[in-house]
């Protein structure tokens, strides 16, 4: 059973930091990539970042470059962990953040077919 579970969201002041986590399991990781997208109220989904599994190359949306860092742990007990370190947060980063399974490229994560329940991030003073 494919599962992706996000955690780490919350309320933070502008300029602050949060670290999101994604625990993925139930599928063969070498066939897929994992990444993040977000959706703010009333807005379309926006790709944020992803890691290409076979070589570890990372991709970022222009809006988060230099502020967000994506990383991963090697699979432990068939659970794959990925993190999104978010620094210098701005009010326009406010959204629900989802990790998803798909394919990672210059177009960020595409063809994603499973995602988690999301973790909300609110940046406000």
Image: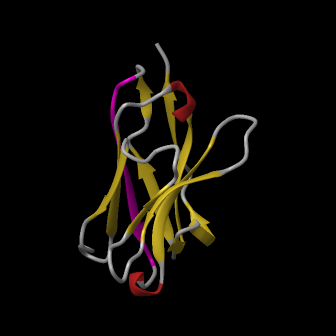
The residue at 70%/34% (across/down) is 41
* In this picture, residue 92 sits left or right of residue 55: right
The residue at 45%/63% (across/down) is 50
Relative to residue 77, is residue 68 depicted above or below? above
The residue at 25%/66% (across/down) is 73
Look at the image and say whether residue 58 sits in the magenta stretch.
no
Q: Quadrant of residue 51?
A: bottom left
Look at the image and say whether residue 25 sits in the magenta stretch.
yes
Give residue 78's position: percent from left, percent from top: 31, 77
The span shown in magenta is 15-26
Relative to residue 70, is residue 64 depicted above or below? above
Residue farthest toward the right in the current orientation of the protein: 42
* In this picture, residue 61 sits left or right of residue 53: right
The residue at 52%/53% (across/down) is 61
Q: Quadrant of residue 66?
A: top left
Predominant secondary structure, magenta span: strand
* In this picture, residue 82 sits left or right of residue 61: left
Residue nearest the observer in this picture, 116 or 91: 91
Identify the coloring.
secondary structure
Residue nearest the observer in this picture, 16 or 28: 16
Give residue 4's position: percent from left, percent from top: 48, 63
Give residue 121's position: percent from left, percent from top: 49, 34
Total marks shown come to 0
């Amino acid at each position: 059973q494919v599962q992706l579970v996000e955690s780490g969201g919350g309320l933070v002041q502008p300029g602050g930091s949060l670290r999101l986590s994604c625990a993925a399991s139930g599928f063969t990781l070498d066939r897929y990539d994992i990444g993040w997208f977000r959706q703010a109220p009333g807005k379309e989904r926006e790709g944020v970042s992803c890691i290409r599994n076979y070589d570890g190359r990372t991709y970022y949306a222009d809006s988060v470059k230099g502020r967000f860092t994506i990383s991963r742990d090697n699979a432990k007990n068939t659970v794959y962990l990925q993190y999104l370190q978010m620094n210098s947060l701005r009010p326009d980063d406010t959204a629900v953040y989802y990790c998803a399974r798909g394919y990672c490229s210059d177009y960020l994560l595409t063809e994603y077919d499973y995602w988690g329940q999301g973790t909300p991030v609110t940046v406000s003073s």
